[in-house]
Image: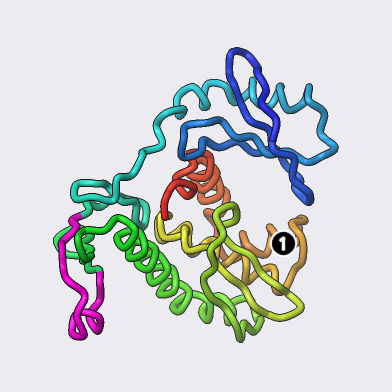
């Protein structure tokens, strides 16, 4: 990772194998992180940063730092919910109970001594459960619509990709961090991966297939790009 300057903006450049496009996001420490293919020259990367300088200036420092204590605001399904941490001892009985709940717009997490590590563990479980529910309701629907079979799907720990599929094995995964997205953007991600089981790559036939089943695709893609740039998915659990 290289540290560079452009138009008064300090950014960190990460060259990534297999990447096709330039990307920028703000990480959990408020740093400007730029990803680029190996073959893209510095001049083009600097030009990309300059072209996005207004957005960068607006968003640097806006990524929230989480305390995982009562009063923290936790992103969920496109909104935020206040966190309430309740001290609850671990006993043979409480181990059988869910260690989190959602009530009156709040996320309540039960953790012995309000241990932050346990709180983070439960928030992650909430995220995994949330994405799993969407997958359970939408994978079969889109598979029927597209005309493919998806015998295996699930949730993974990725923080740099919202979803991934393995066409030769007819399986797909969504990142648990998809739980921070609005439902309609998670649904778009499910459709994206299901479509890859029928059309490989991101050529015109692929996007045509997606748009056939999701007419407002361009608007949803634009919203997902803006959310991705904020780095909201990089600084949680």
Residue found 72% across the figure and 42% down from its top: 21
Residue found 16% across the figure and 68% down from its top: 88
Q: What percent of the width, then of the height, locates residue 163?
A: 59, 62
Residue 92, magenta (yes or no): yes
The prevailing secondary structure element of the residues shown in magenta is loop
Residue found 49% across the figure and 22% down from its top: 57
In the image, is residue 45 above or below residue 184?
above
Give whichever of 32, 162 is nearer the camera: 32
In the image, is residue 6 above or below residue 145?
above
Q: What percent of the width, then of the height, locates residue 60?
A: 46, 27
**Left or right of 154: which side holds 62?**
left
Q: What percent of the width, then of the height, locates residue 98?
A: 25, 76
Query: What is the magenta range?
Result: 84-99
Give whichever of 74, 209 is nearer the camera: 74
**Left or right of 151: which side holds 186?**
left
Residue found 52% across the figure and 26% down from its top: 56
Quarter of the figure that contains the N terminus: top right
**Left or right of 93: which side holds 216?**
right
Question: Circle 1 sits on which residue?
Answer: 206
């Amino acid at each position: 990772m290289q540290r560079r300057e452009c138009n008064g903006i300090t950014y960190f450049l990460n060259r990534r194998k297999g990447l096709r496009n330039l990307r920028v996001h703000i990480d959990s420490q408020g740093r400007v992180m730029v990803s680029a293919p190996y073959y893209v020259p510095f001049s083009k990367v600097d030009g990309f940063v300059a072209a996005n300088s207004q957005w960068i200036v607006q968003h640097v420092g806006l990524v929230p730092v989480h305390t995982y204590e009562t009063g923290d605001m936790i992103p969920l399904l496109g909104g935020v919910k206040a966190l309430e941490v309740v001290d609850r001892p671990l006993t043979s009985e409480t181990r059988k109970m869910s260690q989190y709940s959602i009530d009156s717009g709040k996320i309540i997490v039960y953790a012995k001594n309000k241990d932050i590590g346990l709180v983070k563990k439960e928030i992650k479980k909430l995220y995994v459960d949330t994405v799993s529910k969407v997958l359970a309701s939408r994978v079969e629907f889109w598979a029927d619509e597209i005309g493919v079979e998806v015998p295996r799907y699930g949730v993974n720990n990725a923080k740099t990709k919202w979803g991934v599929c393995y066409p030769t094995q007819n399986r797909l995964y969504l990142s648990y961090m998809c739980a921070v997205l609005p439902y309609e953007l998670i649904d778009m991600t499910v459709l994206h991966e299901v479509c890859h089981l029928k059309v490989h790559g991101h050529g015109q036939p692929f996007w045509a297939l997606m748009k056939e089943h999701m007419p407002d695709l361009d608007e949803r893609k634009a919203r997902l790009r803006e959310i991705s740039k904020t780095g909201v998915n990089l600084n949680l659990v």
